């Protein structure tokens, strides 16, 4: 049993060593030819079409997805489906990245002449320059490996790892050349944590309209309490006769006042409101609102009035709204 376990571990380590070596050797292939291929993609006026069969196809899907999410419009085209109509997706201005370790995959080779007739240029990612794919391409990127990690030398292992790594190298070089920033990345990932942090504004998360608790300066504390209870946010913006924001009243303020004097409930809310609360404008990022609330001293606040450039309280943000949206 111990021998069997040792063999398993040894083979796993050997596999990782072989694949790491295959990736490391790719650095020698980052040359003028690689740069020419990347520049061709940069100058492309349309899309990058990635194609490949079998395991190369699976890797190609990932490369296309990485390119698309990092600023290079791209999609995957199955070569067999392409031969039966999907070549109509390819235009003259496209760049086609064709992947085949051997460079002889029939499904890929069969569509090369048609791609040339369409007018699109081809970048070959393969392990043999003299293969049919290597000879037919406008640009050649060598992804060849000395040996597969598979003990039979059959299952694509080192070669697919090398291909995936070279695809990442292309995508990252393009990102650098395009000066692709976090804000750009967030635009293509609105559902992720980064997208929410960089794209979500206060206007997107604030309570507004009927949900926005607002009371006049001469409203009684009792009536203000009813408004806060109805809206369920534990606070209300206080406005003057012109509807301009002049302060904030919270359930905490009312609780503290109750402990001193019940008679205050019939007094104007202006007499107990907090006249200099933190506020934010609706165009600010939601992450900025969270930062303001958390950094308040001596303790964080849970509500933040939203006041526009004219001084009108157009909404209110509650801490739970930000957390619910995943703003962290």
Image (cartoon, rainbow, N blue to C red):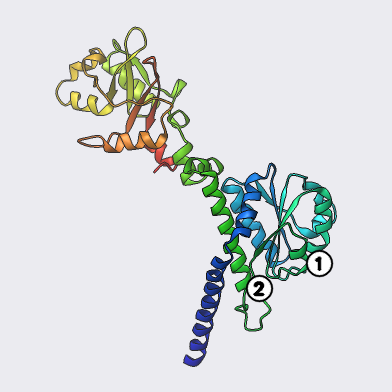
The residue labelled by disc 1 is 106
- Asked whether, in this view, residue 12 is left or right of residue 299, the answer is right
Sequence-wise, the earlier of marks 1 and 2 is: 1
- 251 or 323: nearer the eye? 323
Measured from the top left, where is residue 220 in percent x and y? 28, 13
Is residue 92 among what the camera can see? yes
Label 1 close to label 2 by CB (< 8 Å): no
Q: Residue furthest front?
A: 32
Residue at 56% in and 67% down? 28
Eye-nearest disc, 1 or 2: 1
Instruction: Say above or below: 250 vs 136.
Output: above
Measured from the top left, where is residue 23 in percent x and y? 55, 69
The residue labelled by disc 2 is 156
Q: Residues within 10 Å of mark 2 (few under 14, many from 20)?
A: some
Q: Residue furthest top?
A: 241
- 289 or 323: nearer the eye? 289
Quadrant location, the C terminus: top left
Is residue 325 among what the camera can see? no
Q: Quadrant of the rendered structure where residue 292 is?
A: top left
């Amino acid at each position: 049993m111990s021998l069997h376990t040792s063999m398993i571990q040894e083979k796993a380590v050997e596999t990782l060593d072989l694949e790491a070596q295959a990736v490391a050797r790719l650095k020698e292939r980052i040359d003028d030819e690689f740069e020419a291929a990347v520049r061709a993609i940069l100058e492309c006026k349309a899309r990058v079409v990635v194609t490949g069969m079998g395991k190369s196809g699976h890797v190609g899907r990932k490369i296309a997805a990485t390119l698309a999410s990092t600023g290079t419009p791209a999609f995957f085209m199955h070569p067999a489906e392409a031969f039966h109509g999907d070549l109509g997706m390819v235009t003259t201005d496209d760049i086609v990245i064709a992947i085949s370790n051997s460079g002889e995959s029939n499904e890929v080779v069969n569509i090369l002449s048609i791609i040339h007739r369409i007018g699109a240029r081809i970048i070959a990612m393969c392990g043999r320059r003299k293969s049919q794919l290597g000879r037919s391409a406008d640009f050649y990127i060598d992804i060849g490996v000395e040996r597969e990690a598979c003990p039979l030398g059959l299952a694509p292992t080192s070669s697919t790892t090398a291909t995936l790594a070279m695809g990442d190298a292309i995508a990252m070089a393009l990102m650098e050349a395009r000066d692709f920033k976090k804000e750009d990345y967030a635009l293509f990932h609105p559902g992720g944590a980064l997208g929410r942090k960089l794209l979500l504004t206060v206007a997107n998360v604030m309570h507004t309209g009927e949900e926005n608790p607002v009371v006049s300066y001469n409203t009684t504390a009792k009536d203000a309490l009813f408004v806060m209870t109805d809206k369920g946010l534990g606070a209300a913006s206080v406005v003057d006769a012109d509807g301009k924001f002049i302060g904030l009243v919270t359930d905490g303020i009312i609780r503290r006042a109750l402990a001193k004097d019940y008679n205050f409930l019939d007094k104007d809310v202006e007499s107990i409101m907090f006249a200099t609360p933190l506020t934010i404008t609706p165009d600010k990022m939601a992450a900025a609102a969270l930062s303001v609330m958390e950094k308040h001293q001596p303790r964080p606040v849970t509500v933040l009035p939203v006041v526009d450039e004219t001084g009108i309280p157009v909404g209110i943000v509650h801490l739970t709204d930000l957390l619910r949206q995943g703003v962290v």
